[in-house]
């Protein structure tokens, strides 16, 4: 930007110099002596060539340097904005709701993508070539005024009063000048005999050229306004510090984590629906190595409980405890590294099977042996080895090249490769056909061994072997026990099972 600004500063002198020589060369045509006319014509032509060479160098440097700096700025801003979006919050009144920032319709994926693509580019409108043009204009105007005052300060003052009109009507000025050129030719030749009038041309030409340059700069004013607004949005986003910050190094990192989970008196409402309490005093726990199944009608708060454990949100009241410690006191990155999630619709990326499994643990370099071990535990290793490219096979956009059961087993392998102490299964088999469900369920049953597991499911086959089953209604646990105990009680769980069997 420094080189570009210096080039613009030098380039700004081009217009005034051209204007001066242009005014001088008009007087050449009034010369009577052919030899003098030839010499002056040659001299001014060479000066024009020199100015052209200077303009070429300065404009090239200005364009290249400002272009490069502008693209570097755009790239850096996009990186910082994306990073800020990934850790952002929604500040509402005096409370901070973390991932709720994304729940706001104003922060939908399409809106954020557009903002990421356009705002950084708009900020470039206030820098780069625009900055060069502004520097160019300042230099041209300063030089023009100095030259004009040297030649005739009285006439300069008169013409400066007309500069605003010249700036706003650059095209009209050009047409007017061109239209009167032929009619004024005789008068100009005659006036060339008088030095004072030769100075009516220098002053007028230099200020006119400067005004044209200013008019060109003024045409970019809307870009500066857009850039200012975009910069405000970007800086506002970058300055927000989320309460739940994945990049923070603060918090405890226990070395003897065993996976004892407890939800104690949890109250919670989503930030975009503050008037609807999803959880109203939820209290439930699961011991190390045990499986807890959460059942209930849609919207009762099952998935919300898992999101609170992952610290996507903070409860309005109550505590989520891990080994007796409040999750708010734990290092967020460490906490999430202990959790493995398999959801109903796993997201696979358009890359190889190996890379999709590696994605389960980005904190380290996952070896090929670990990938294959996780795939074996997920019962998909033999299928992968039967493919032409084996682990290098691309799964397609969102895993479209794989069946539902295959996608789910790859997702399980991805969860297992991080060796989590707690496994979270959110409707992991509900989207599968009967045959695929049997295979995946066997894999999940094996994966649960030795791990604390929280299962959300509607199907009886998925939950009946759980150590504890909690029935959630109206944001609270209304029944809790084993499958046999709850069936014998004949309460809400019994009704849910019977409704499923009848269906």
Image (tube, rainbow, N blue to C red):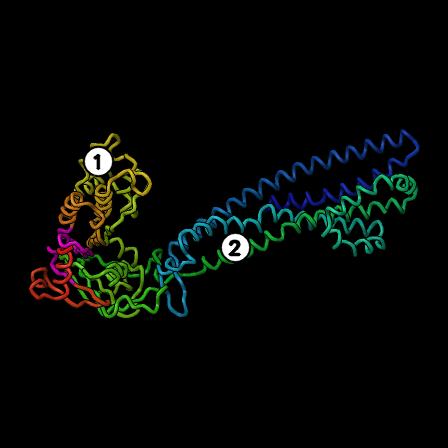
Q: Which residues are magenta?
A: 448-470
Q: Which mark is residue 384?
A: 1
Q: Is residue 452 magenta?
A: yes
Q: Secondary structure at mark 2?
A: helix
Residue at left offset 24%, top offset 65%: 320
Q: Is residue 455 magenta?
A: yes
Q: Is residue 481 above or below residue 403?
A: below
Q: What's the CA distance linking mark 1 and mark 2?
A: 48 Å
Residue at left offset 20%, top offset 39%: 372
Decide which of 370, 426 is in the foreground and name it: 426
Residue at left offset 65%, top offset 37%: 57
Side of 229 where 272 appears, left or right: left
Q: Residue 199 location, x and y as percent?
A: 86, 46
Tag 2 or tag 1, which sits nearer the N-term?
2
Q: Which residue is disc 2 drawn over?
A: 230
Q: Residue 119 location, x and y as percent?
A: 50, 51
Say if residue 289 shows up in the picture.
no
């Amino acid at each position: 930007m420094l080189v570009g600004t210096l080039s613009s500063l030098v380039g700004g002198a081009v217009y005034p110099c051209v204007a001066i020589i242009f005014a001088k060369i008009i007087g050449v045509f009034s010369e009577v002596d052919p030899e003098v006319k030839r010499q002056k014509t040659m001299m001014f032509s060479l000066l024009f060539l020199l100015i052209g060479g200077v303009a070429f160098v300065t404009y090239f440097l200005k364009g290249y340097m400002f272009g490069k700096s502008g693209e570097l700025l755009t790239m850096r801003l996009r990186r910082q904005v994306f990073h800020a979006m990934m850790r952002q919050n929604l500040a509402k009144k005096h409370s901070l709701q973390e991932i709720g920032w994304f729940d706001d319709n104003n922060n939908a994926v399409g809106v954020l993508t557009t903002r990421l693509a356009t705002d950084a580019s708009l900020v470039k409108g206030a820098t780069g070539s625009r900055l060069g043009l502004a520097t160019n204009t300042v230099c041209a105007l300063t030089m023009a005024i100095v030259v004009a005052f040297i030649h005739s300060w009285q006439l300069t003052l008169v013409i400066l009063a007309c500069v605003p009109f010249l700036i706003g009507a650059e095209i009209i000025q050009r047409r007017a000048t061109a239209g009167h050129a032929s009619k004024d030719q005789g008068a100009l030749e005659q006036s060339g005999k008088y030095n004072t009038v030769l100075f009516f041309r220098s002053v007028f030409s230099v200020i006119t050229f400067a005004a044209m340059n200013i008019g060109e700069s003024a045409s970019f004013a809307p870009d500066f306004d857009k850039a200012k607004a975009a910069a405000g949005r970007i800086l506002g986003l970058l300055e927000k510090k989320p309460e739940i910050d994945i990049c923070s190094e603060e918090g405890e990192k226990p070395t003897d984590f065993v996976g004892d989970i407890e939800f104690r008196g949890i109250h919670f409402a989503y930030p975009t629906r503050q008037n609807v309490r999803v959880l109203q005093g939820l209290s439930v726990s699961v011991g190390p190595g045990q499986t807890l199944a959460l059942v209930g009608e849609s919207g009762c708060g099952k998935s919300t409980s898992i999101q609170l454990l992952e610290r996507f949100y903070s409860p309005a009241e109550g505590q989520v405890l891990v080994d007796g410690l409040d999750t708010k006191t734990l290092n967020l990155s460490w906490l999430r590294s202990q959790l493995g999630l398999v959801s109903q619709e796993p997201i696979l990326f358009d890359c190889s099977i190996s890379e999709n499994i590696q994605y389960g643990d980005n904190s380290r370099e996952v070896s090929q042996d670990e990938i294959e071990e996780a795939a074996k535990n997920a019962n998909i290793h033999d299928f992968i080895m039967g493919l032409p490219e084996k682990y290098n096979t691309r799964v397609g956009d969102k895993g479209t090249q794989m069946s539902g059961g295959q996608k789910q087993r790859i997702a399980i392998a991805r969860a297992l490769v991080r060796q989590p102490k707690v496994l979270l299964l959110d409707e992991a088999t509900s989207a599968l056909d009967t045959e695929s469900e049997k295979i995946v369920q066997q894999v999940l049953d094996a994966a649960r061994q030795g791990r604390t597991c929280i299962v959300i499911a509607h199907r009886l086959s998925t939950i009946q072997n759980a150590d504890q089953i909690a029935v959630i209604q109206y944001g609270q646990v209304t029944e809790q026990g084993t499958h046999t105990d709850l069936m014998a009680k004949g309460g809400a769980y019994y009704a849910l099972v019977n409704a499923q069997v009848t269906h």
